[in-house]
Image: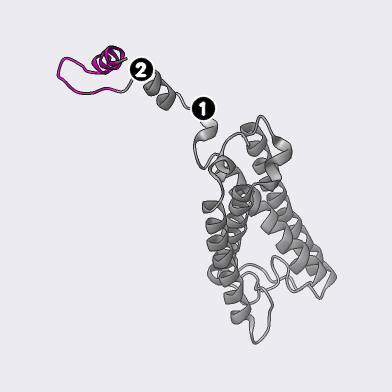
């Protein structure tokens, strides 16, 4: 037994006297399958979250509550776009067109996110939607949508606001705060997920 142990040790020593890991151990580390790499579903999850967050914004704020449309604040915007009042038929028609373009972009984001996700998931797809990592990344994407859309459309361009009126700044800031909470919460959720939840195969 001692001779065998000595032989195995000698087999791991190079001419310089440095211990080397067995070839089988090196092979297992350097040829780990892609599904073991963390973050494999991160990009698809974020893109999917951007699209879903945009859909929620459009359906809830543009259509159900009708707090704003894409161009309802262009009378006070910072880029000089012609004003289209949602209280007139021509103005509502133009705003509806731009809302449709917005929904098209969010729909494409959802399709791209799903396409990337399913191209990376080759087995166990039924369990995919229970993955904490996936839902964490989706929340990150939703939060990023709020932050980017809020900063660009509400503050830089000023083409619309969350809820126009004397308190519109507070509504806009609340929209950004929600985005920051979603990003932080989603990041923590995916960080706390088991390692296999981050895999390219779930």
Can you see residue 61? yes
What is the x, y in percent for residue 26?
37, 23
Q: How many marks?
A: 2
Quadrant of residue 88 within the rendered picture: bottom right
Which of the two residues, 113 or 186, is positioned nearer the viewer here?
A: 186
Which of the two residues, 12 or 151, is positioned nearer the viewer here?
A: 12
Q: In this view, which residue lies farthest toward the right?
A: 89
Binning the other alpha carbons within 10 Å of mark 1 as few (below 14), some (14 to 19) or many (20 upward) gives few
Report the residue at 73% width, 61% height from top: 56
Binning the other alpha carbons within 10 Å of mark 2 as few (below 14), some (14 to 19) or many (20 upward) gives few
Q: Is residue 14 magenta?
A: yes
Where does label 1 land, which residue?
33
Which of the two residues, 97 or 194, is positioned nearer the viewer here?
A: 194
Q: Is residue 131 magenta?
A: no
- In the picture, the disc for residue 12 is none
Which of the two residues, 80 or 139, is positioned nearer the viewer here?
A: 139
What is the x, y in percent for residue 169?
59, 80
Q: Secondary structure at mark 1?
A: loop
Quarter of the image containing the C terminus? Answer: top right
Report the residue at 27% width, 12% height from top: 3
Pointer 1 or 2: first along the chain: 2
Placement of 27 over or under 146, stated as above or below = above
* Span shown in magenta: 2-20
What is the x, y in percent for residue 53?
67, 58
Q: In the drawing, does residue 182 fall left or right of residue 31?
A: right
């Amino acid at each position: 037994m001692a001779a065998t142990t000595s032989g195995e040790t000698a087999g791991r020593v190079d001419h310089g006297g440095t211990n080397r890991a067995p070839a089988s151990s090196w092979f297992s580390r350097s040829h780990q399958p892609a599904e073991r790499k963390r973050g494999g579903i991160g990009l698809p999850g974020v893109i999917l979250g951007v699209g879903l967050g945009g859909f929620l914004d459009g359906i809830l704020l543009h259509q159900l509550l009708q707090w704003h449309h894409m161009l309802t604040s262009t009378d006070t915007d910072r880029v000089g776009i012609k004003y289209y009042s949602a209280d007139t038929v021509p103005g509502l028609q133009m705003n509806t067109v731009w809302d449709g373009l917005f929904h098209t972009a969010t729909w494409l984001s959802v399709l791209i996110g799903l396409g990337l996700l399913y191209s990376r998931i080759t087995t166990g797809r039924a369990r995919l939607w229970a993955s904490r990592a996936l839902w964490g990344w989706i929340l990150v994407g939703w939060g990023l949508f709020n932050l980017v859309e809020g900063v660009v459309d509400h503050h830089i361009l000023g083409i619309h606001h969350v809820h126009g009126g004397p308190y519109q700044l507070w509504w806009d800031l609340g929209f950004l705060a929600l985005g920051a909470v979603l990003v932080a919460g989603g990041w923590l959720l995916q960080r706390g997920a088991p390692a296999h939840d981050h895999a390219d195969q779930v």
